[in-house]
Image (cartoon, rainbow, N blue to C red):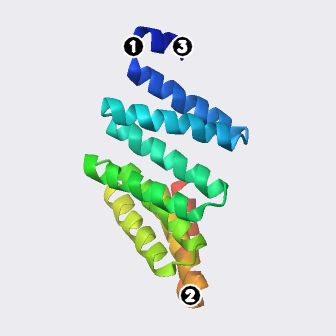
Amino acid sequence: LKLFREFGDRLNELRVLKDIGAAEQAQGRLAAAEQRYDEALSLSNQIGATREAASTLNNLGAIRSLNGDLRGAQNRYQEALSLYTKIGEKRLTALALTNLGEVLFARGDLKKSLDSHEESLGINRQLGDISGGAYDKYRIAEVLAQNGDLRAAESGYRESIKEQTEAGV
């Protein structure tokens, strides 16, 4: 990190900050991870690295979620989603929608959760991502079950398992 700062290599400085944040997060040091991610986000914005900013926002959403701050997680995931959509990153847009859908589910907003997972499923189908689509179907079934539509939920769970099995996941 120090070396990249000395040479003014801002992009690699940014990547190292994110890597340190990920290492801190993996070891359960969430406050330290959040601090590194905040530094990375600031640097991303300074140098105009939109994709890196979106990725960092996604990481910050995960930290907020792990800390029990579901509203904060939702905000960060929505910011990441907006940036991924802006730059046309379809696969990462689907990931952000899935993350957002999970937080919305945890917050009890089942309608918006379902909408997020269905939008992610549509993108994953466009991309031919069987594994991502199967996961979306599982999460949709979870929402349906919570809504009391057990028949549709069971069907969704079965489809998800079938697709994962066929894909070798």
Location of the C terminus (image quadrant): bottom right
The kind of residue on which mark 1 rests is Gly
Give the image quarter of residue 47: top left
* Badge 3 or badge 1: first in the primary sequence: 3
- Mark pair 3, 2: CA separation: 52 Å
Q: Is residue 120 above or below residue 146?
A: above
Check the image and report above or below for 8 versus 28.
above
Residue at (51, 74) in percent of width and height:
140
Q: Which numbered dot is residue 147?
A: 2
Between 53 and 45, the one lying in front of the other is 45
Please provide percent x and percent y for residue 150: 60, 88
Tag 1 residue: 8
- Mark number displayed over residue 2: 3
What label does residue 23 carry, if any? none
- The reply to whether residue 166 is visible in this rendering is no
Q: Amino acid at mark 3?
A: Lys
Could you tell me if the residues under marks 2 and 1 are in contact, i.e. CB atoms within 8 Å? no
Work out how far the residue at label 2 is from the one at label 1, CA to CA, in angstroms.
53 Å
**Residue found at x 52% / y 70%:** 104
Percent across and percent down for residue 68 are 66, 60
**Does any portion of residue 64 appear in the rendered image?**
yes
Q: Estimate the x, y position of residue 154 in percent, counting from the top left.
A: 59, 82
Amino acid carrying label 2: it is Asn
Q: Quadrant of residue 138?
A: bottom right
| Neighbourhood count class around disc 1 (C-alpha, 10 Å): few under 14, some 14–19, many 20 upward | few
In the structure shown, which secondary structural element does the residue marked by tag 2 occupy? loop
How far apart are the two marked residues, 3 and 1, measured between alpha carbons? 10 Å
Q: Earlier in the sequence, mark 2 or mark 1?
A: 1
Q: Residue at x 40, y 51 (%)?
A: 80
